[in-house]
Image: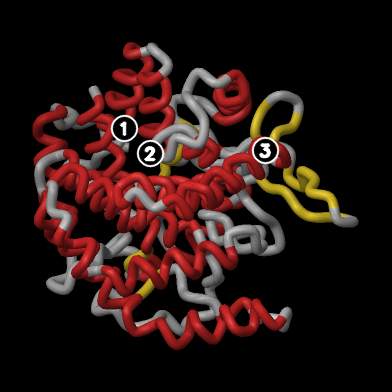
């Protein structure tokens, strides 16, 4: 990937990652997911939260706070929309997907009006978690009052709709419920509940946790997606997805040494691991390559499970994929699941996204953990 030139050493890539993230943060706070990839010229709540967290743990806390204030400005204008959704929900009325809150916004905070799937709940849970983590790290509890309207709007939204089928973190499978998404919601409600000692948030988080443990475990491990059929929740996509690592790190729905998580990690290793980690077995997006951010997540949980050597190998592998400018891509085609699809995506969208700020962010997170 780096054309045989000498790779950047970790301190150099860390500095480059900070530089790239700060350079691609809008003055109002949104992070461009990938500035040179037109389809990713938005700020996602999910991606942005993890980018902000990476900046938090590496000492760039002003950047993180600017992002959380950006989310607040985006959401505080949505109270009427959320109240309308809650009224429909209480009345038992049908709600179309397009009526829900968006998953990404223009960098200046405007709504994204494209037809790309919008109804995703993971970002809303993640931003509550990220904000709570930021306040815990900085001690700036004044943000709780300053951002109160958007915090409460998000809490109301998640309380009502956490169990609704919605797009997964890859903008796919909108008819299903996804444990990785539920982990984000659990993590956000629990973190904010602990921060503010709010029993109702902790109770809802526990309800979500028990739902996942009751319905999203198959053959002793977690599954990619579930669906309600004949008033019973069943695994509809019983394979694994690397985003299932989120159940443990960072959201803590289960401990890294929980037997169900250990079995999930073993299955990810058996089915999705090469040098890096792929998303899921049926992936055809750009041929289903290895994703740098997921490799960082895998390294993170291996570190938590006591395998520091594997975590360090993951960090080295990620660094080896930087180009001569220190830019990290979204994924690499070293070991494709669907090689025949790679050229089709190249023709349709051009080269895979580079730099991907989320890749840089997770490199910083894993580096900080090590």
- CA distance separating discs 3 and 2: 22 Å
Considering depth in this image, is 56 or 145 the residue closer to the camera? Answer: 145
Where residue 278 appears, as percent x and y from the top left, is 52, 37
Could you tell me which quadrant the N terminus lies in? top left
**Can residue 278 be seen in this snapshot?**
no
Q: Residue at x 9, y 40 (%)?
A: 15
Pointer 3 or 2: first along the chain: 3
Q: Secondary structure at mark 1?
A: helix
Pointer 1 or 2: first along the chain: 2
- CA distance separating discs 1 and 2: 6 Å
Q: Which residue is mark 2?
A: 292
Q: Residue at x 42, y 67 (%)?
A: 154
Is residue 5 rendered to the left or right of residue 275? Answer: left
How many C-alpha atoms fall within 10 Å of the one at disc 2: few (<14), some, or many (≥20)? many
Q: Which residue is mark 3?
A: 223
Q: Are marks 1 and 2 in contact (CB under 8 Å)?
A: yes
How many C-alpha atoms fall within 10 Å of the one at disc 3: few (<14), some, or many (≥20)? many
Q: Which residue is mark 1?
A: 318
Where residue 352 appears, as percent x and y from the top left, is 40, 54
- CA distance separating discs 3 and 1: 26 Å
**Can residue 111 be seen in this snapshot?**
yes
Considering depth in this image, is 306 or 173 the residue closer to the camera? Answer: 306
Q: Residue at x 14, y 39 (%)?
A: 58
Considering depth in this image, is 8 or 173 the residue closer to the camera? Answer: 173
What scheme was used to colour the molecule?
secondary structure
Labels 3, 2: front one:
3
Identify the residue at the far right of this view: 230
């Amino acid at each position: 990937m780096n054309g045989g030139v000498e790779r950047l050493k970790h301190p150099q890539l860390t500095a480059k990652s900070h530089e790239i993230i700060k350079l691609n943060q809008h003055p109002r706070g949104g992070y461009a997911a990938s500035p040179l990839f037109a389809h990713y010229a938005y700020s996602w709540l999910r991606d942005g939260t993890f980018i902000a967290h990476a900046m938090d743990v590496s000492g760039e806390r002003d950047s993180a706070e600017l992002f959380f204030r950006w989310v607040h400005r985006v959401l505080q204008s949505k109270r009427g929309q959320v109240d309308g959704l809650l009224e429909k929900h209480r009345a038992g009325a049908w709600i179309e997907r397009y009526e829900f809150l968006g998953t990404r916004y223009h960098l200046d905070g405007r709504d994204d009006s494209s037809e790309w799937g919008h109804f995703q709940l993971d970002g809303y849970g993640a931003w509550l978690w990220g904000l709570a983590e930021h306040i815990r790290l900085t001690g700036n509890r004044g943000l709780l009052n300053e951002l109160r309207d958007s915090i409460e709007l998000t809490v109301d939204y998640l309380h009502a709709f956490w169990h609704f089928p919605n797009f997964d973190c890859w903008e796919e499978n909108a008819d299903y419920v996804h444990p990785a998404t539920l982990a984000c919601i659990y993590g956000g409600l629990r973190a904010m509940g602990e921060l503010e000692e709010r029993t109702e948030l902790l109770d809802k988080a526990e309800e979500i946790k028990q739902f996942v443990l009751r319905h999203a475990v198959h053959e002793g491990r977690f599954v990619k997606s579930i669906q309600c059929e004949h008033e019973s929740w069943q695994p509809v996509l019983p394979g694994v997805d690397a985003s299932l690592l989120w159940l443990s790190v960072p959201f803590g729905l289960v401990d890294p040494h929980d037997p169900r998580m250990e079995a999930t990690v073993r299955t990810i290793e058996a089915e999705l691991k090469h040098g890096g980690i792929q998303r899921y077995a049926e992936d055809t997006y750009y041929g289903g390559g290895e994703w740098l951010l997921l490799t960082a997540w895998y390294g993170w949980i291996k570190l938590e499970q006591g395998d520091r050597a594997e975590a360090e190998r993951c960090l080295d592998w990620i660094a080896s994929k930087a180009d001569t400018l220190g830019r990290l891509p979204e994924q690499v085609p070293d070991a494709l699941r669907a090689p025949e699809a790679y050229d089709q995506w190249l023709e349709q969208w051009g080269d895979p996204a580079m730099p991907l700020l989320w890749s840089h962010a997770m490199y910083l997170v894993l580096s900080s953990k090590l």
